[in-house]
Amino acid sequence: MLVPMKVDYGVRILVHLASLKPDEIAKATEISKKRHIPEKFLFQISNELIEKKFIKSLRGPKGGYSLAKSPNEISIADIIEGLDKSMAPVSCLYNSDICVISGHCSQQDMWSDIEQTLMSKLESVTIKDLAEKDRTFIDAAKLEN
């Protein structure tokens, strides 16, 4: 099962913003370079994150992005749902038109249980958790250099 790049990039944007000092703003170019997100996709995803009220933007020469919520209030499951993605391991769980035996398949309940287990875990992981872990990796890299 692959996590859609849209979700991965959305998490990267939010983790970057969570790692900033309070009231600090990050420019799109900075996020793009530091988090390895193509700017074109960063702008598209950030617009959705703004619409879903995860982040806010400030226009102008001193503008950029910042979190609209506390990082401990944003779970990975929230981001997946906010970016209109499913973590269903098979497509028939979210589109029954794909499979002619959908609803009459012995595997469907198993795949649904797997999706629920995954989403339950992702509900327990917050952007704050990932930002703290990110800081640990950054600090370790500084010590190595």
Image (cartoon, grey):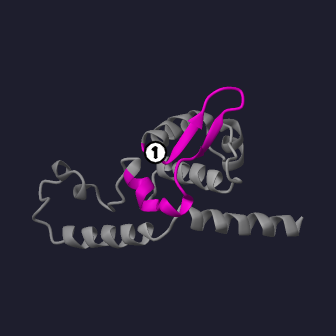
For residue 59: magenta? Answer: yes
Q: Residue at x 68, y 43 (%)?
A: 25
Question: Residue 57 placed where, x, y %?
Answer: 57, 36
Q: Nearer the viewer, residue 107 or 11?
A: 11
- Please identify the quarter of the rendering in which residue 110 is found: bottom left
Q: Which residue is drawn at 38% across and 69% down?
A: 118
Question: Residue 39 placed where, x, y %?
Answer: 62, 35
Q: Which residue is drawn at 48% across and 43% down?
A: 49
For residue 28: magenta? Answer: no
Residue farthest to the left, as pictured: 104
- Please identify the quarter of the rendering in which residue 135 is found: bottom right
Q: What residue type is labelled 1?
A: Lys
Left/right placement of residue 36 relative to residue 85 reads right
Q: Nearer the viewer, residue 68 or 49?
A: 68
Quadrant placement of the C terminus: bottom right
In the displayed structure, would residue 46 be above or below residue 121?
above
- From which residue to which does the magenta span run? 52-81
Q: Residue at x 66, y 41 (%)?
A: 32
Provide the residue designation for mark 1.
53
Quadrant placement of the N terminus: bottom left
Question: Residue 53 placed where, x, y %?
Answer: 46, 45
Left/right placement of residue 82 relative to residue 141 reads left
